[in-house]
């Protein structure tokens, strides 16, 4: 038995508890993980905060307004797989 699978995973937070999923949760706040690295979070009201401190990052395929006050993109709906790519972070310097 494998303890984990690498790739794209979502960690869902809601009143029913927390759980891992390989598909984007449709009802709650969730964080986005790739190969065990935290890449970001989409909050229940649909803003998306992207973490830039990992070896890979989320690259949005469309332009979404950035909310500087809340440090996140105003998506306006639940992300779909067609909205983003996971790409290498060229600014990543590794553990310091």
Image: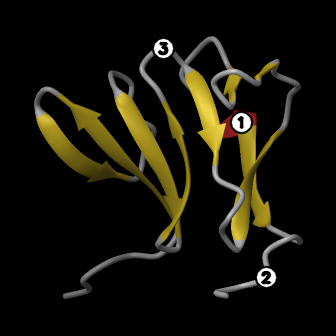
x 33%, y 21%: residue = 27
**Residue at which label 3 appears:** 45
Distance CA(mark 3)–CA(mark 1): 19 Å
Residue contact between numbered discs 2 and 3, judged by CB atoms under 8 Å:
no
Q: If the image is split into quadrants, where does the N terminus sit?
A: bottom left
**Residue at which label 1 appears:** 82
Q: Quadrant of residue 46?
A: top right
Earlier sequence position, callout 3 versus callout 1: 3
For mark 2, give the secondary structure: loop
| Percent position of residue 54, x then y | 66, 69
x 44%, y 45%: residue = 31
| Percent position of residue 19, x then y | 22, 48
**Residue at which label 2 appears:** 93
Q: Is residue 80 visible?
A: no
Distance CA(mark 2)–CA(mark 3): 32 Å
Nearest to viewer (mark 1 / mark 2): 2
Q: Is residue 40 visible?
A: yes
Mark 1 burial class by Cα count in 10 Å: few <14, some 14-19, many 20+ = few
Nearest to viewer (mark 2 / mark 3): 2
For mark 1, give the secondary structure: helix
x 73%, y 42%: residue = 84
- The label on residue 14 is none
For mark 3, give the secondary structure: loop
């Amino acid at each position: 038995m494998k303890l984990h699978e690498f790739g794209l995973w979502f960690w869902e937070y809601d009143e029913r508890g927390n759980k891992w999923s390989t598909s984007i949760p449709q009802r709650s706040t969730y964080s986005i993980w790739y190969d065990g690295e935290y890449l970001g979070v989409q909050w229940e009201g649909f803003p998306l905060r992207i973490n830039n401190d990992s070896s890979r990052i989320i690259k949005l395929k469309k332009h979404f307004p950035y909310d500087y006050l809340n440090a996140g993109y105003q998506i306006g709906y639940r992300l779909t797989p067609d909205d983003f790519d996971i790409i290498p972070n060229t600014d990543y310097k590794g553990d310091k």
